[in-house]
Image (tube, rainbow, N blue to C red):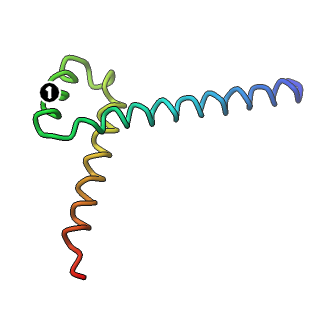
Amino acid sequence: MNFRTKLRDIRVNLADRRTERAARRRLGAELAAFRTPAERAELDLILGRYTREETREIREILNRQDHERQRAGTLVGSYRG
């Protein structure tokens, strides 16, 4: 493989990764709208129709968002100024 081919492959790979990260950020923003217990229950019912592997990425994002919300709530509640 010559240098130009390697360089092109690297550029394509980087562009693909940027596209994937942007798509994941958009998905995260859309999922963040499901905040109330009722909304999350509805989303869980929808996700339950699919396999764990099919919903893995969505569940990872939701779990991370839940953790961040809990942490933020704990930090705010623990402040004793």
- Which residue is found at the position 43% from the left and 32% from the top? 26
Position of residue 79 measured from the top left corner of the image (x, y, whole percent):
23, 75
The quarter holding residue 2 reads: top right
Type of the residue with mark 1: Glu
Quadrant of the drawing holding the N terminus: top right
52, 16: nearer the viewer: 16
Which residue does the numbered mark 1 point to in the structure image?
42
Position of residue 80 measured from the top left corner of the image (x, y, whole percent):
21, 80
Q: In the picture provided, is 70 more to the left or to the right than 17?
A: left
- Which residue is found at the position 26% from the left and 20% from the top? 51
Quadrant of the drawing holding the C terminus: bottom left
Q: Is residue 67 above or below residue 62?
A: below
Secondary structure under tag 1 reads: helix
- Which residue is found at the position 53% from the left and 30% from the top? 20
Please state the total of marks drawn on the protein image.
1
Position of residue 46 measured from the top left corner of the image (x, y, whole percent):
19, 21
Q: In the picture provided, is 67 more to the left or to the right than 19?
A: left
45, 81: nearer the viewer: 81
The quarter holding residue 30 reads: top left
Q: Is residue 3 above or below residue 49?
A: below
- Which residue is found at the position 48% from the left and 29% from the top? 23
Q: In the picture provided, is 24 more to the left or to the right than 56?
A: right
Within 10 Å of disc 1 (Cα), the crowding (few <14, some 14-19, many 20+) is few
**Furthest-top residue in view?**
49
